[in-house]
Amino acid sequence: MSSRVSARSAPNLLYRWSNMTKYLKQTAALLIACALFIASMQHAIAASYSFKVHNTTEETITKLLASEDGKTYGFFDIGKGIKAGQTVTLEWDKSTDGEDCKQWFKAVFADGEESEAVQFDFCEDDLTLEF
């Protein structure tokens, strides 16, 4: 037996090599795409920012107001409110991701009273706001 390649089998080997190269390139591209997808999913999961609010008063908190500049306030949807003694976990909307860590907060209570504005640093881990 000879280990030589005949003239007839050379094109066949080139064809096989070409297919194998194409297959390897496609597999590499697929692996890179999967790695990028997994990395983006991990970032999306890790990028949710949450904090806790503890109501230390005897009134239900009906609204939470937040402001980056201390002048213009938006509000968090807290449903029917945060009852006296209750602690809830809230999550920032993704639209706020570019904002500063320090935010001003006010609570509005069932009797219509509004708390003083207090600045909190939301870059702190396990932040709990108390009103």
Image (cartoon, rainbow, N blue to C red):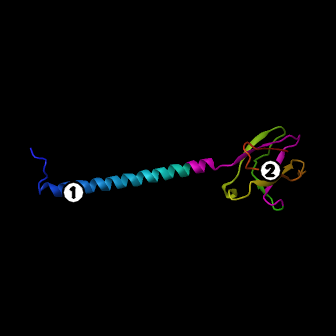
- At a point 55% along the width and 49% down the height, the residue shown is 41
Mark 2 neighbour density, 10 Å: few (under 14) some (14–19) many (20 or more): some
**Residue 63 colored in magenta in the image:** yes
Q: Judge by depth and name the residue closer to the eye, 63 or 130.
A: 130
Quarter of the image that includes the N terminus: top left
**CA distance separating discs 1 and 2:** 67 Å
- At a point 90% along the width and 48% down the height, the residue shown is 111
Q: Nearer the viewer, mark 1 or mark 2?
A: 1
Residue sticking out furthest to the left: 1
Q: Amino acid at mark 1?
A: Leu
Question: Vertically, is 72 above or below 80?
Answer: below
Helix, strand, or loop for circle 1?
helix
Quarter of the image that includes the C terminus: top right
Q: x, y percentage for residue 96?
A: 70, 57
Q: Judge by depth and name the residue closer to the eye, 25 or 48.
A: 25
Question: Vertically, is 126 above or below 6?
Answer: above
Q: Which residue is mark 2?
A: 120
Q: x, y percentage for residue 38?
A: 51, 49
**Residue 56 colored in magenta in the image:** yes
- At a point 84% along the width and 62% down the height, the residue shown is 71
Q: Which residue is mark 1?
A: 14
Helix, strand, or loop for circle 2?
strand
Question: Vertically, is 51 above or below 94?
Answer: above
Q: Could you say which quadrant of the image residue 17 lies in?
A: bottom left
Residue sticking out furthest to the top: 85
Mark 1 neighbour density, 10 Å: few (under 14) some (14–19) many (20 or more): few
Q: Which residues are magenta?
A: 42-70
Q: x, y percentage for residue 16?
A: 23, 53
